[in-house]
Amino acid sequence: MLYTTNLSRMLDEVFTFPYQTKVLDNSFVYDFVKTEKDGSSKIEVVVPGYSKEDLKLEVSDGILKLWCDLEGKKFKRHWKISDSVDTKKIKAECKNGILTVSLTLKEKSSKVSSITIE
């Protein structure tokens, strides 16, 4: 499942999403977002030739950032994530040239608390 640079660019131009930024250079990176039935999401990023040590992933101010800045291998991707995502439970795994980032929703509080009326 390798995407050539031209195909990746064409797909970026045809299918634009608000959470997706463009590939900044001639890399093979392409991403897919899957929403699960429970509302959680998975982002799968095609990263052939990259190891988990090459990739940097962080979240700040509701933006999930993925980048690699090695000589000859450079790219950057950003996704806006919902406030309902539990940023402390974000997990990432890199296997066989695919980086999978799992976004889990925050648990809803089902506690009922009484409020005293004054």
Image: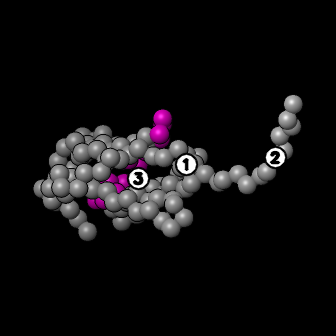
Mark 3–mark 1 Cα distance, whole angstroms, equals: 27 Å
Mark 3–mark 2 Cα distance, whole angstroms, equals: 45 Å
Q: Amino acid at mark 1?
A: Ser
> Which region of the structure is painted magenta?
45-62
Q: What scheme was used to colour the molecule?
A: one colour
Residue 52 appears in the figure: yes
Q: Secondary structure at mark 2?
A: loop
Identify the residue under disc 1: 84
Tell me the number on the disc at residue 113: 2
CB contact under 8 Å: marks 3 and 2: no
Q: Nearer the viewer, residue 65 or 117?
A: 117
CB contact under 8 Å: marks 3 and 1: no
CB contact under 8 Å: marks 1 and 2: no
Residue neighbourhood size for the residue with mark 1, other residues' Cα within 10 Å, grouped as few (<14), some (14–19), many (≥20): some
Q: Secondary structure at mark 3?
A: loop
Query: 37 above or below 117?
Result: below
Which comes before the other along the chain, label 1 or label 2? 1
Q: Amino acid at mark 3?
A: Lys
- Residue 28 placement (x, y as % from top left): 22, 55
Q: Amino acid at mark 2?
A: Ser
Tell me the number on the disc at residue 52: 3
- Mark 3 vs mark 2: in front: 2
Mark 1–mark 2 Cα distance, whole angstroms, equals: 22 Å
- Residue 37 placement (x, y as % from top left): 50, 67
- Residue 109 placement (x, y as % from top left): 70, 51
Of the 4 image quadrants, the one containing the C terminus is top right
Q: How many marks?
A: 3
Residue visible at 23% across and 46% down?
A: 23
Query: 20 above or below 34?
Result: above
Residue visible at 86% across and 37% down?
A: 116
**Residue ranking furthest to the top:** 118
Residue neighbourhood size for the residue with mark 2, other residues' Cα within 10 Å, grouped as few (<14), some (14–19), many (≥20): few
